Image (cartoon, grey):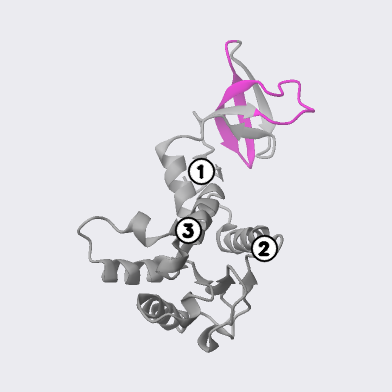
């Protein structure tokens, strides 16, 4: 498998169903199966005609079935995991943000969605903070002045941040309304989600972080 490239989670090896995605090729949009791969080029056998053509590059063919267990697992392993640190009062806005990130093919973590019945919720939150790539600290005029578990979550994240390389983006303060930035979060550039285009900028930033983390070829 080490010699095979993956495209959208599918290992491009002999037997893999594909279709040609090069408009300059006479077999454009024709379905076929990879017969062999050698020196970075592929031989594809086409449909009922059983005709074959050699010399396709990886840029000229695409997998035709990306809904396999292997492909889903591979894609899940390359999704950015985002912990949503927030106060209870901000749940409605955080739920919207959770859906936004899910629809953007990321893995947000939200207590009411991801803590299973009977699970130790304190340990679950600690484990989630440790496992996530990004901690998004949702700030509002309510959460910045609130005592309670949200402050504990922030402390978990700060402790984890101490273990990260200095240039690693890990904590992102995100304001859902105008509010002061807590002093212990002030060292990190905050984002204003309430501003025009704020959520789009957040998604763009997270996608850039995901690309930087997962852009290694396999």
Label 2 belongs to which residue? 198
Q: Which mark is residue 167?
A: none
Q: Which residues are magenta?
A: 20-48
Q: Which of the two discs, 1 and 2, labels the residue nearer the N terminus? A: 1
- How packed mark 3 is, by other alpha carbons closer than 10 Å (few <14, some 14-19, many 20 or more), is few
The answer to which of 17 and 89 lies nearer the viewer is: 89
Q: Could you say which quadrant of the image residue 201 lies in? A: bottom right
- Image coordinates of residue 65 in percent, x first then y, are 51, 30
Q: Residue at x 57, y 82 (%)?
A: 181
What SS does tag 3 mark? helix
- How packed mark 1 is, by other alpha carbons closer than 10 Å (few <14, some 14-19, many 20 or more), is many
* Residue 63 at least partly seen: yes
Residue sitting at the far right = 24
Q: Could you say which quadrant of the image residue 152 lies in? A: bottom left
Label 1 belongs to which residue? 9
Instruction: Measure the C-alpha gap from mark 3 to mark 2.
Output: 17 Å
* Residue 106 at least partly seen: no
- Image coordinates of residue 143 in percent, x first then y, are 47, 75
The answer to which of 42 and 183 lies nearer the viewer is: 183
Q: Could you say which quadrant of the image residue 115 lies in? A: bottom left
- Image coordinates of residue 37 in percent, x first then y, are 58, 36
The answer to which of 175 and 122 lies nearer the viewer is: 175
| Vertical side of 32 occupied by 121: above or below | below
Q: Which of the two discs, 3 and 1, labels the residue nearer the N terminus? A: 1
Q: Is residue 140 left or right of residue 83?
A: right
Viewer-side label of 1, 2: 2
| Vertical side of 48 occupied by 162: above or below | below
Q: Which mark is residue 92?
A: 3
């Amino acid at each position: 498998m080490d010699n095979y490239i993956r495209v959208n989670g599918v290992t491009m090896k002999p037997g893999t169903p594909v279709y040609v995605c090069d408009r300059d090729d006479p077999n454009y949009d024709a379905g076929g199966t990879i017969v062999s791969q050698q020196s970075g080029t592929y031989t594809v056998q086409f449909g009922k005609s059983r005709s074959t053509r050699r010399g396709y590059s990886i840029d000229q063919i695409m997998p035709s079935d990306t809904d396999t267990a292997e492909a889903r697992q591979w894609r899940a392993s390359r999704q950015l995991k985002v912990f949503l640190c927030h106060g209870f009062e901000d749940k409605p806005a955080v739920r919207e943000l959770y859906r936004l990130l899910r629809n953007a093919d990321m893995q947000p973590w939200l207590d009411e969605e991801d803590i299973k019945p009977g699970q130790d919720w304190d340990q679950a939150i600690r484990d989630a903070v440790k496992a996530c790539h990004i901690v998004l600290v949702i700030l509002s005029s309510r959460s910045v002045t609130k005592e309670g578990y949200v402050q504990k979550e922030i402390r978990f994240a700060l402790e984890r941040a101490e273990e990260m390389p200095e240039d690693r983006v890990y904590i992102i303060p995100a304001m859902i309304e105008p509010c002061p930035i807590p002093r212990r979060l002030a060292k990190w550039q905050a984002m204003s989600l309430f501003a025009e285009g704020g959520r789009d900028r957040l998604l763009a930033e997270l996608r850039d972080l995901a690309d930087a983390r997962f852009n290694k070829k396999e």
